[in-house]
Image: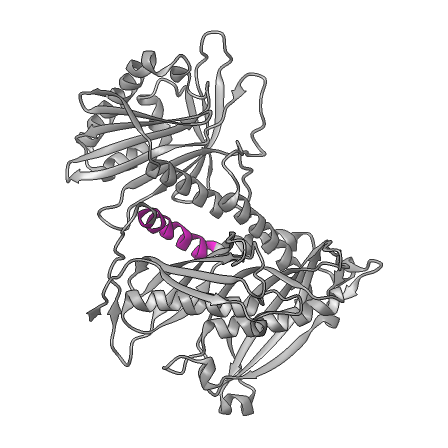
Amino acid sequence: MERSRAVGGWVPMCQSVMPAHANHRGELSAGQLLKWMDATACLAAEKHAGVSCVTASMDDIQFEEAARVGQVITIKAKVNRAFKTSMEVGIKVTVQDVLTNVEKIVSVAYATYVVKPVGAEKVELEPVKLLSSEDHLEHALASERKRIRLGYQEVFQNLMQESNKEGDRCDTFEEEDTVSTDLTHVQSIELVQPPHANHHGNTFGGQIMAWMETVASISASRLCRSYPILKSVNMFKFWGPSVVGDRLVFNAIVNNTFQNKLEVGVRVEAYNCEEWIKNQARHINSAFLIFNSINDKGELLTFPKVKPTTKDGVRRYHGAIARKRIRLARRYMLFAKDDKPYDLWDKSNQAYMSYSNIATLTHLAAEPGWEVISTLNNIKIWTREDGDVLSLKVEMQVETASHLAFSLLSNFTYRQQWDKHFLTCEVLQAVSEDDKIYYITSPPVTGHQPRDFVILVSRRQPLEPSEPYIVAVKSVILASVPRSTEHCRSEIPCAGFQIYSDSSSSCRVYYFNQMTSGAMPYLAAGLTDSSNTIEETALECIKFLELKGSKG
């Protein structure tokens, strides 16, 4: 087995947008951009692997800005993390106006590539060389994004089961001014030629994406009677390869409309000569593309409602609703600012909520600007101020194996044994083996009501020896636990532990808490006077871990 070489850093591609790349509005066509993004990402993957690579999938893509003829598109790609024979590649697209020198972000995306060695040769990918703090951060979060990819189908099926309970009869769509989805069906056939493929004869994933965008645009235009604009794509996933000489059949249809947006589903099937004669298709790709459209004044157009006419059409209609819920949850959790105090928990966003929980703690731990305010024995305390947000970091040296400390600290029902600020703690929902929702109450502080919290606790074990164990905490809204008059509902924007192994019997535990004033009672009076209280709690934590660890 050959081990690939590991090379870090961005792979850049710069393109001047020419008329041949643009649509009728003089804007860079989304299909052309997808081809460039795939080509750049593939170069980054092959630079790391040292062998040929093929596209396995591309995560949800959002297009934030349009590039026009004469402007310069810059695409940068780098491998964030290698997983044996696959790797995640981060892609960043910007557009620059050569006259004003203004640069804007067009899209940030993540793609997965797999190695394609020649013959029976097997290649195991080397770890990525991490050259900067950003590299370390993206490397840590890549494993979380992989979890989302693997869990996407389960979340989608859960939402579809919910919609099935409401019934799936076609006559529920009998409304005035609806348009049959059959009128939007488009089929197109492409013959894969050598320019469409790499040197091994495999069709470029970006070329297939571009063809899918073309047929989807035609389908969307049949409903909006104007020129649709691609705004986002729901995860391109390649189920199988196609090669030079294959006939690719693209079927596109509008699945559903949402006022000024619509979803088009595209299915791609491949045939070689023999399969073509026998009508034996290979399903190689499916994707869902989101469009809007504008009038001459630049105002968004409202799309008519659609009516499916078949059982499969009804399935696609409800599927579009489920994907919209997931898409909104993803965009809210991954791209919203940090000024939202709570997150509403439901089936559509649980994967992204867990990701956000881990990502927020990882970002906080990597932030610069921490100031040491106290050093005593095996405990060190840092603070960091950012506007009206105060963050706390406590380092504890513990004579307990890291995996035992992780097990003890990730189970919050043990918290009352060492933290006096926890009065009661119960598990409300065991979402998964690694994610649980707790209800916590704290004792009253003089002059104040007792507080309560509803929190999500997400835990992760390291994939590599140099990585920490993680226990991330944030407040969530659970509809079944409303506010009460007995307690003051408090929030935890971000908190948790990172646990690094020092030896087989010792570890370093870092506790983080990001808070507003009053969120932690022992910090409200000022850090200078309260550091003793923090140290007392930390000492209790160390004592608890070492006592329990000695018995473990």
Tell which of 370 and 188 is nearer to you. Answer: 370
Q: Is 449 situated left or right of 374 in this image?
A: right
List x then y, in percent, for residue 505. 15, 36
Q: Residue furthest front?
A: 99
Query: Is the N terminus in the top left, top right, bottom left or bottom right quadrant?
Result: bottom left
Q: Residue at x 45, y 7 (%)?
A: 446
Q: Where, quadrant-wise, is the C terminus in this rendering? A: top left
Please check the rendered image and state whether residue 398 is part of the magenta-colored stretch, yes or no: no
Q: Which is nearer the eye, 495 or 80? A: 80
Please identify the quarter of the rendering in which residue 537 is found.
top left
**Residue under the image location 20 percent in, 70 percent down:** 2
Q: Which residue lies furthest to the top in this view?
A: 447
Q: Which SS does the magenta portion mostly show?
A: helix
Q: Where is residue 492 in the image (x, y as percent from the top left)?
A: 45, 29
Tell me if residue 136 is in the magenta stretch. Answer: yes
Q: In this view, does 337 lie to the left or right of 215?
A: left
Residue 371: horizontal and vertical position, in percent?
30, 26
Compared with 159, 413 (above or below) is above
**Residue 173 coordinates in the image, percent (x, y):** 77, 59
Q: Which residue lies furthest to the right in this view?
A: 176
Q: What stretch is highlighted in magenta?
A: 135-151
- Residue at 58%, 67% in the rendered image: 29
Q: In this view, does 532 lie above or below 184?
A: above
